[in-house]
Image (tube, rainbow, N blue to C red):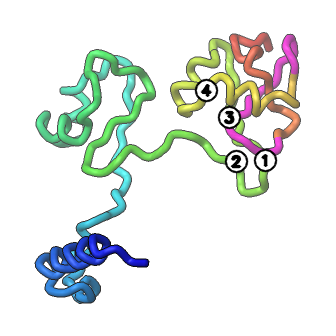
């Protein structure tokens, strides 16, 4: 059984749509710029990596844009909390993901471990969590052993991946 209010609601929706688009069936006939303005995928922005000593003004200058544009492209950025290896946008769009993915052969993305390295650097640089590093390295090197690489993505670990507890200044 169809209630009258359902028919009225559907008719009202069709009437509003017809006012906006000409008719219920004319959506596909809209010019592309109107039709595609409802939802659109944003492209990645042009990225610059923060280095020691950078501030928002110097980053805007390195980007070759005004301070106002830099603020527009990075609306949530707190200039007082910039950290080395943070990414900023130098154009419109969204920041691409820093997260590494596994290699085409299914092996893990690995990171060279050098004296002075620590897990916090990996977490910031690759936008991963300590729990993820633990998971990805659970079947690899154990505490007390050193290796030249650490796993920074899902995938089959190669024999040179290390456990995150090792990444705090391993001895060579």
Q: Residue 31: which quarter of the image?
A: bottom left
Q: Quadrant location of the C terminus? A: top right
From the image, tell me which residue sits under label 3. Answer: 152
Q: Tag 1, which secondary structure?
A: loop
Asked if marks 3 and 2 touch (Cβ < 8 Å), the reply is no
| Precedes in sequence: disc 4 or disc 2 | 2
- Relative to the observer, which residue lies in front, 30 or 114? 30
- Whether the magenta-drawn stretch holds residue 167 is answered as no
- Whether the magenta-drawn stretch holds residue 147 is answered as yes
Residue 131 x, y percent position in the rendering: 68, 24
**Distance CA(mark 1)–CA(mark 4):** 19 Å
Asked if residue 93 shows in the view, the reply is yes
Residue range (magenta): 142-156
Q: Residue 102 carries which label?
A: 2
Residue at 70% across, 47% down: 102
Residue 63 x, y percent position in the rendering: 25, 40
Q: Nearer the viewer, mark 4 or mark 3?
A: 4
| Precedes in sequence: disc 3 or disc 1 | 1
Main SS of the magenta part reads loop
Q: Crowding at label 4, few (<14), some or many (≥20) Cα neighbours within 10 Å? A: some
**Distance CA(mark 3)–CA(mark 2):** 8 Å
Asked if residue 84 lies left or right of residue 7, the reply is right
Q: Which mark is residue 129?
A: 4
């Amino acid at each position: 059984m169809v209630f009258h209010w359902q028919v009225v609601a559907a008719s009202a929706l069709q009437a509003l749509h017809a006012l906006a688009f000409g008719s219920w069936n004319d959506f596909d006939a809209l010019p592309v710029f109107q039709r595609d303005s409802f939802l659109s995928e944003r492209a990645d922005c042009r990225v610059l990596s923060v280095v020691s000593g950078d501030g928002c003004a110097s980053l805007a200058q390195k980007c070759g844009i005004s301070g106002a544009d830099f603020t527009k492209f990075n609306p949530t950025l707190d200039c007082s909390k910039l950290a080395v290896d943070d990414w900023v946008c130098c154009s419109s769009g969204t920041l691409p993901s820093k997260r590494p993915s596994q290699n085409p052969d299914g092996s893990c993305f690995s990171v060279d471990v050098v004296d002075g390295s620590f897990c916090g650097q990996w977490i910031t640089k690759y936008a991963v969590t300590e729990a993820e590093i633990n998971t990805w390295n659970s079947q690899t090197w154990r505490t007390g052993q050193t290796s030249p690489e650490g796993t920074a993505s899902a995938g089959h670990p190669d024999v040179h991946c290390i456990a995150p507890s090792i990444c705090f200044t391993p001895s060579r």
